[in-house]
Image (tube, rainbow, N blue to C red):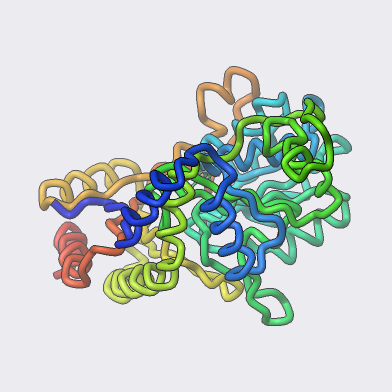
Amino acid sequence: MINFNIPYISGKVYKYLSKVFLLKSFSGNGFFTDKCHQFFTNTYNYKNPLLTNSCTSALEMAAIILDLKAEDEIIMPSYTFVSTANSFANRGVKIKFADSHFNHPNIDENKIEALITPRTKAIVVVHYAGVACNMDVIINLANKYNLYVIEDAAQAINAYYVNADNNPCILGSLGDVGCISFHETKNIHCGEGGLFILNNEKFLPQLQYVWDKGTNRIDFKKGVIPFYSWVSLGSSFYPSELCAAFLHAQLPDIEKVTRKRLMLWNTYHKNLSGYSNIFKTPHIPDYALHNAHIYYIVVKNITERNNLIQYLHKNKIQALFHYQALHKSPYYLKNNESINLPASEYFSDCLIRLPLYYKLKKSQVIYVCNKIKEFYNLL
Ligand SMILES: *Cc1c(COP(=O)(O)O)cnc(C)c1O
């Protein structure tokens, strides 16, 4: 069987985990957490990176830090993971879904302005498959209406947006906050994990408090205060040192992993592009330097999608569809009128993700491509 994903494991993982046992310091915010923070500062020049338990946790931190609450509205794509919406819905925030581009699952920046009302507080962008959204347009819109920009960069580690001046900007550094995932399905992982990046320094004073359960323990640790108190909203947002050590072992391999994934991605693309009357392949805008998180094709309809997935499965290839558009979800429809977002529904019905991971071989990618062509009688 060619699996859809096999999580990457670096050789250093066991050594670093043993070190946690030696140090006998298992809870969070210790030696390896600091090491990970240093990596993100040194490698990507991220401002104020903080490890979290997940990208979901990071998005929940964003909702608290930006003080988004009931009566506020935010705009986001419907074609995304549940957590993009839930992290804000948990605080009573009203979600307005915007449609995707027809040639890419990312939010269509031209569909945002019509959804802005006096209550709108933020735009949440999702860089699907590690492909940047059209950030200059979105940030200009946010500035015009005084809105925050939140980047759900869950899939976007080591991926860039190329701005109008032709400078590559690392994803997660462009919005007021950025959120990344290290779930085992992502390019680099620690089982469950995430990163919160604060770019808007207006919120710097609360940052550590929200991260550390709403307490000022950081000031206590520095010896500035005699005891720590409840000073803010917050939660248990940071991971244990076991997760941080695992992640610290994986992080130096990001370039190597990305390079291999890009090679495999390009192999798919070379073999599957050119049949656009039968199925579509990913469109990468000029402003996106992606990280090969996902290779997908988009077929004509849901029946064809299911048949192709079944055909690949019979040939020992695991291919998967992806998100169920959130505007069609039971929870959304319980509280909102039904709306039509045709591009989002199109990707829910027709997108198929193909196997892509570090250990996958080029010959296996070619085998997958040939089985797809065989299904369509293209060989
Ligand atoms: C994976 C993912 C998440 C959730 O990340 P976790 O670390 O599992 O919480 C959120 N948004 C998007 C777009 C994702 O792909």
Residue 173 on image: x %, y % = 68, 62
Up-down relation of residue 282 to residue 241 (above or below) = below
Which residue is pictured at 52% across the width and 37% down the height? 27
Up-down relation of residue 28 to residue 227 (above or below) = below
Which residue is pictured at 39% across the width and 55% down the height? 16
Q: Residue furthest bottom?
A: 166
Up-down relation of residue 302 to residue 101 (above or below) = above
Which residue is pictured at 81% across the width and 39% down the height? 120
Judge by depth and name the residue closer to the eye, 256 or 172. Answer: 256
Residue 26 on image: x %, y % = 47, 39
Can residue 43 be spotted in the picture? yes
Residue 31 shown left or right of residue 275 in the figure:
right
Up-down relation of residue 256 to residue 282 (above or below) = below
Judge by depth and name the residue closer to the eye, 12 or 153. Answer: 12
Which residue is pictured at 30% across the width and 64% down the height? 358
Query: Which quarter of the rendering shows the C terminus?
Result: bottom left
Q: How many marks?
A: 0
Q: Which image quarter: residue 377?
A: bottom left
Q: Residue furthest top?
A: 334
Residue 84 on image: x %, y % = 59, 40
Q: Residue furthest left?
A: 315
